[in-house]
Image (tube, rainbow, N blue to C red):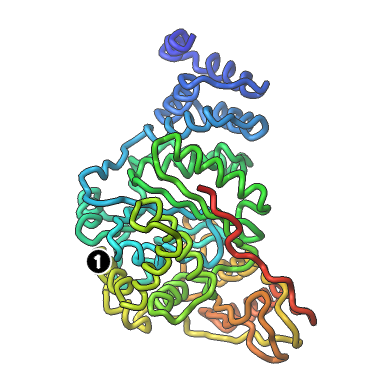
Amino acid sequence: MIQWFYLFLRKGTIVMLMSELIIKKRDGGVLTTEEIRFIVDGYTRGEIPDYQVSAFLMAVFFRGMDRRETLDLTMAMMHSGDTLDLSGITGVKADKHSTGGVGDKTSLVLVPMVASLGVKMAKMSGRGLGHTGGTLDKLESFPGFNTGITHEQFMEQVEKVGMVIAGQTADLDPADKKLYALRDVTGTVNSIPLIVSSIMSKKLAAGADVIVLDVKTGKGSFMKTQEDAHELATEMVEIGKMAGKKTVAVVTDMDQPLGCAVGNALEVKEAIATLRGEFAGDLLELCLTLGGCILTASGMADSDEQAREMLMETIHSGAALKKLAEFVEAQGGDPASVYDPTMLPMAPVQVEVPAEQAGYVSELDALGIGMVSLKLGGGRATKESDVDLSVGVVVHKKVGDPVAAGESLATIHAATEQAAAAAVAGYRECVKVTAQAPAPVRFVKEIVR
């Protein structure tokens, strides 16, 4: 049947094939491996039009896919372009992915820690869009840093330095670029099979042996409930295992920002301070958890406890901070800025947000704070928007912290006094202070192995 469809495709009657497959999925049918590959290949080559693929995506959104279909979609997307062959790189190769959140500078801390222990970290990252920040934007806070390195430079740096973070090449998983752009404008982003195939096709194409996933849940994430986050984490781990990769997912809280800094250069400064051993909050806890999963999955540690000790030693010894400086220098940045963060961009206006009453912080809206940073210029409303690397918010009081009347809840970093005043008002709407302390929140919800 598929060969017959291909014959008609060559004669130009694409509609007949796609209409049949759309109807099949619309009515709850299960697509074959060949049918899924046909759709992905045809759309990537431009032989199947947007409007038909839009209808197909909506059918998947409502009808879902079983695990075999999801794996087939993932593998078809992965093979739609080039893949990285890291087999020539010595040692264990690992990759980490986050589903996105506010204040998420995890890669800037985790990757140097793990790389300093000998695990090769070959990571491709993206730019921020909307309330979520992008690792590439943050890295460009380092003077001269280059995210657009060549394939040859990428491979050489993984071997020599032990870590690389760069932008995704145009030829890597082109199907995902086209499909995600279409999902973004057709209301089909929040579909578990489509999210899984989008994330895992890129991770598998990047060639790592070990894949660790940070799945956010809460107000500042795409997965608003823990149940949805659990389902996403489980599906990605199973797809990774079926593809022959050691895959672990960690479900973590995103009701409030991760760490204290929200904004590009501000987050870089917090990452550097964490590698110096100056912070011991949720950011460090996340990096120890994710790093522990990498070390145990790769066979470098026998237990999570041993892995945490190894990772903490990279901070105490200064090895992780040194690895960050080596990485920055390898990609054209000034390594001196790692040891002297005053060299990083700094906003000209800094204003405090004083508490209007005493009590305890009971809520801290991550999404709202992300939007405050966005409106200051720290994020992108569209892909074409310029980003001010210096602006953002530094949170001083997180959920559960006591606060006195007049005490600073946060510092706003802005380009103008007018922007700062608007951000102060916006930040107040994100914070709730109550007389009673809230119940403790478990930051790491679960680990799916």
Q: Is residue 144 above or below residue 88?
A: below
Residue in the image at 68% along x and 77% along y:
400
Extreme residue in the right direction:
435
At 46% from the left edge and 8% from the top edge, which residue is drawn?
Answer: 4
The x, y position of residue 417, in whole percent, is 57, 84
Of residues 352 and 432, the one drawn nearer to the viewer in this rendering: 432
**Looking at the image, residue 204 lies above or below residue 52:** below
Which residue lies at the image location 49% right of the left edge and 8% below the top edge?
1
Choose top left, top right, bottom left or bottom right for residue 255: bottom right
Would you say 177 lies left or right of 318 here?
A: right
Identify which amino acid the numbered label 1 is placed on: Gly
Residue 103 is situated, as x and y percent measured from the top left of the image, at: 53, 67
Residue tagged by mark 1? 332
How many numbered marks, from 0 up? 1
Q: In this view, does 84 lie to the left or right of 295?
A: left
Asked if residue 428 is positioned above or below residue 212 in the image, the reply reads below
Expressed as whole percent of the image width and height from the top left, the position of residue 134 reads 46, 60
